Amino acid sequence: MPTPIVMPQMGESIAEGTIVRWIKKVGDHVDRDEPLFEISTDKVDAEIPSPSEGVLTEILAREGDTVSVDSVVGTIQVIGEQAAQGAPHVKTEPPDAHASAPAPVAPPVAVARDSVVVSREATAGGSRQQRSSPLVRRIAREHNVDVARITGSGLGGRVTKKDILAFLAAGGRNRENGDPRPVRDSDERVEVQPLSAMRKKIAEHMVLSKQTSAHVHTVFHVGFSDIERIRSAKKAEYERLGVKLSYMAFIARAVIDALRRHPIVNASLDGDRIVYKQDVHLGIAVALETGLIVPVIKNAGEKNLLGLSRAIADVAARARAKQLTPDEVHGGTFTITNPGQLGAQFGMPIINQPQVAILGVGTVEKRPVVVDDGLTIRTMAYLTLGYDHRLIDGAVADQFMADVKRNIEQFEQNRI
C-alpha cells in the first residue's frame, strides 16, 4: 500500500516545520533515504529523506506551507504495488479524465491535516494556550501576554512564533484589528519577493532578542602578533593532521578560559532566576547564501586547540551542506560571530537568546600601533562584546574582555 510521507519531529520542542522546497517532483522515482524535500524549523534547516523506495505520487503540502509534525505531506507508491482501490495517484491526467472518479484529493487532505492538529491539541479541552509550542508560551509569559488573545495562523488555529512576534510588534493588536500595512508609490519600479523561510526565522529571532535583552556593547583593540607567530610555526603540522589552524580556534580557546573566570557571562535568565551553566557550549555563527545559522560545539571547554579547530571546521562545513541536526543548533551558552572575515572592522552583534552575551570578531590585519612610545607594526583586531545589561554590568563585561585580550596577546603553549 502507499507509504505516507510525514513531517518529522526535528527536536523535542519543535511542533511544526515550513516546507522550503520539494527536491523531487510527482512521478519521480526515489530511493530509500534519498532527499525528498527541504524544511526549515525554529532550530535548523534540513533535507528530509524518503521513508521508502518508490514513486512520488502525491504532494499534499506546497512549498511555503507550515505544517505540524506527523502531518502527511505526500505519498510514495512502492514499485509493483497497486494504488489503493485502483485510484490513479500520479496526477498526470486532466481533472475531467474520469467523470465517475471520487472527489478531488485536495479537500479530504486538508481535513486530514487539520484533524492531525486537532487530535494532538483537543486533549487540552480546546484551550487556545495548548494550541501553541512551548517556545510561544515562554515568549507569552515573558511579555505577560494571554495567548488566547492571538489569532493563530498555523494549522488548526495553532499560534506560531510568527503570530506572537507580530502581535507584540503591533503593540498587542491583532493584524486584522488595524495594524497598518506599508504603502508604496504605484509608479515605483520594484521587484517584490517573499521572505525565505530562513529569513523569516532570522527576523523573528532578532526582533525577539532586541525586545528581550537590554543590549550594550564594549569594544577592545586586541593584538594578534603572538597568535600569528604560533600559527606560522604550527600551520604545516595542523595541515598534516587534516585541519586548518584558524584565528577562530585561538579566539574560542581564549573565550572559553575567560568564561571559566566569569561564569555570569556563560549564564542565562529564567524569569527572576539566574541559571549558571556548568559547561561551555560554544555557538559559532556560520554565514550561508540564504542567511545565518549558529551550530553549537558541545562541551567546548574539554577540547584543546586541535579539537576546537576540527570541531569549528566540521560544523561550518555541515552547516553549509545542510547536514546539521536540531541538537547541533540548540543549547548554546555563548556565541562567537565573525563579521571580520569579509573585512568589517567591528560589528555590534545581537545576542542569541536565551544567552546573555555574544562576541563579534573584526578583521585581523597589520596596523601601526604605539609600543613603548614608538610606532611599530602589529597584527591587530577589534573584538566587540554584546551583553545583556539586565544581568551583566559594564565593569563585569570589561573584566571579561580584558581577560580575553590577555589570553590572546599572551597565548601560552600549554593551550595548544
Image: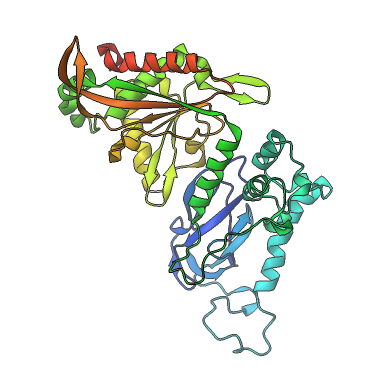
- Residue sitting at 28 percent across and 33 percent down? 363
Task: Please tell me whether residue 36 is drawn above or below residue 213 in the rendered image.
Answer: below
- Residue 58 showing in the rendered view: yes
In this image, 408 relative to 197: left or right? Answer: left
Task: Please tell me whether residue 252 is drawn above or below residue 16 in the rendered image.
Answer: above
- Residue sitting at 45 percent across and 14 percent down? 260
- Residue sitting at 18 percent across and 30 percent down? 240
Q: Which colour scheme is used?
A: rainbow
Q: Position of residue 346 (x, y in %)?
A: 35, 32
In this image, 170 relative to 195: left or right? Answer: right
Q: Residue furthest top?
A: 372
- Residue 52 showing in the rendered view: no
Task: Please tell me whether residue 368 is drawn above or below residue 204 in the rendered image.
Answer: above
> Residue 397 versus residue 9: which sits nearer the camera?
397
Task: Please tell me whether residue 23 is drawn above or below residue 289 in the rendered image.
Answer: below
Q: Where is residue 95 in the image (x, y as percent from the top left)?
A: 60, 85
Q: Position of residue 272 (x, y in %)?
A: 68, 22
> Residue 14 versus residue 383: which sits nearer the camera?
383
Q: Residue furthest right?
A: 125
> Residue 17 versus residue 69: which sits nearer the camera?
17
> Residue 173 versus residue 412: which sits nearer the camera?
173
- Quarter of the image with the N terminus in it: bottom right
- Quarter of the image with the C terminus in it: top left
In this image, 149 relative to 380: left or right? Answer: right
Q: Where is residue 385 in the image (x, y as percent from the top left)?
A: 43, 25
- Residue sitting at 24 percent across and 29 percent down? 245
Query: How many labels sit on residues?
Result: 0
